[in-house]
Amino acid sequence: MAQSWSLIVGVIGILFYFYHNKSQQSVEESMVLNGTYDYIIVGAGSAGCVLANRLSEDLTSTVLIVEAGGSEEENEVMHIPALPGLLQNTKQDWAFRTVPQKKSCQGLKDQRSAWPRGKVLGGSSSINFMHYIRGSRHDFDGWAKEGCEGWSYKDVLPYFIKSEDNQISRLKDSAYHGTGGPLVVSDGVSSPINDKVYRRGMEELGYKTVDCNGESQTGFCFGQETVKNGERWSTAKAFLRPAMNRPNLHVSTNSHVTKILIEKEKAVGIWLVKDNVKYTVKARKEVILSAGAVNSPQILMLSGIGPKEHLSSLKIPVKVDLPVGNNLEDHLMLFMIFRDNTSSGFNPSDWADLQYKLFRSGPFGKVHLEASAFFGEGRKVPPYFQVLFYTIQARTEYAREFQGMYNYNPQIIEGMANFYKSILEKDEGMFVTCNGLLHPKSRGTIRLQSADPFDPPLIDPNYLDHPDDVKDFLKGLKEMLRLANTTAFRSVGASPSDPYKEYYPPCNSLPYPSDEYLTCRLRHYVYTIYHPTSTCKMGKDGDDTAVVDLQLRVKGISNLRVVDASVMRHVTSGNTNAPTIMIAEKASDLIRGIDSVKDIRKKTELL
């Protein structure tokens, strides 16, 4: 009887899901392309969806947004906040791999890190972990000091506020946050140990509890996540879907852009392939690349815009010699696992599954990446290290899932599965810290594998190449271990003594937690935290490292811009989705020649 009831409830939940989303499906699938548009946006990701919404607000301008992937409605898991890891290596993921790394990733298969990027409406905002972090005010002031006038913190803050519909009660009176914008930001707290352990432990070390998207970032920050009513709130849902019925906006999915059409140093359109048919689409005003930090430089180079020597080696005619694909920055993370004898973490159950299907509530409606700690040297500099607290329970299947997610060497998977099994046999809980260096000095590259637009690019993040990166990472890890030694952490059985003897060969043979051991862990088991930036970075006139100017226009080619994370001067302090959305908001004003945030700016000038 119970099984029959579960089946009935499950069917009702599934029917509700499809009814709920029926009206939003297939709008883009039946789109007939025009020959010409005013604006063509390449990439319907975190930035592209924002641009499509804002540019099409002007009903006198026609807008086409082109996405290589399909609809975000094709994968039900995409809407469930608790399951972002299951989206990697799916049809909605480009599923890139780096080239073999020389000084890192030694415990990964072929020494290559997995590099998931969203290939779907919403881009990486449709597959990410939904943690909303804007970055430090010092990041943007640093951009301005390097010549990026108009991109200081006081310049960009109004655009963060414009986007936001903050629904967190403790922040309702904050001048740093907005309400009524398209992007819902909700409370990420999901378990009692967030306050009992994470916050109290940080306070024992002298760190204050802060709004890390407010006045100061350094300290402990309760999680803020892009989730609305128990569903992922990607830029596809927040910005693109509400604009899809506008007559001047067309959305073309499963459309792979192969090249930008350039005539007399002017971008005039694109070439794309859809359903194995080649199309040429012209742009009256601008072509805007929003394909992300990997694909935007790839498309530029395929179009003859990039390093002359590299393009010439592939027999691609050079239009403009620019440092496209250089200056790649990314955040690395290292997992640490700690005991939690309260078993507070997310542990999927049949009831939780039914609760979510029926009501979009319960554990599946939260990300469980419920807090961040930012370690720093005070309020006058950006933090140097981020710890993300991920409150989940051990499951033996994690070993197999992690093999696909992080490209672990298959030879260690059995040992990892036994490690998780040992936690379960002791009937104990756990939580995970994702530890990341915020401002690495190593720089990588994006290069073409060939002149074939369907060949994946060569991604070389050059992780841990600069010796200071290991030194600074060790500094952050030691601070994390100090945190693990607090009374708050010990109250749930956590400690800095590695109680679970995490299975990470060959490092387990070294004394824990010596510098030698931690360095071994770094060299073998760090991987991307999904924040690549700066491969088409902005800069003032005369800056030989810059690809775009301060209005994000590609140097040497008119009517062509890049608007996405690739234009960041440097990677920001924390997760990069929020600042990418901000960049698109500001770029929309630059393109349209308007100031949509003048009223907000009056309220934020003194913040």
Image: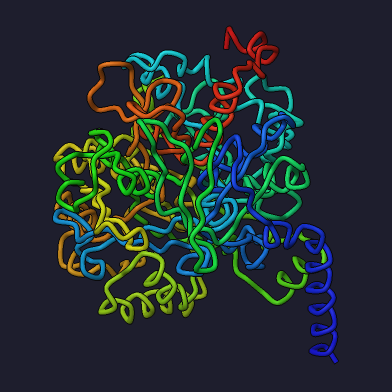
Q: Residue at x 58, y 28 (%)?
A: 588
- Residue 359, above or below 6: above
Q: Is residue 355 left or right of residue 160?
A: right
Q: Give the percent coordinates (x, y) of residue 113.
A: 30, 60
Q: Give the percent coordinates (x, y) of residue 337.
A: 40, 60
Answer with the quarter of the image where residue 258 lies: bottom left
Q: Residue at x 52, y 16 (%)?
A: 155
Quadrant in which the N terminus is drawn: bottom right
* Residue in front for this viewpoint, 600 or 494: 600
Q: Residue at x 68, y 22 (%)?
A: 174
* Residue in front for this viewpoint, 427 or 359: 359
Q: Is residue 410 left or right of residue 42?
A: left
* Residue in front for this viewpoint, 395 or 97: 97
Quadrant in which the C terminus is drawn: top right
Q: Give the percent coordinates (x, y) of residue 427.
A: 52, 75
Answer with the quarter of the image where residue 375 lies: top left
Q: Give the percent coordinates (x, y) of residue 263.
A: 38, 36
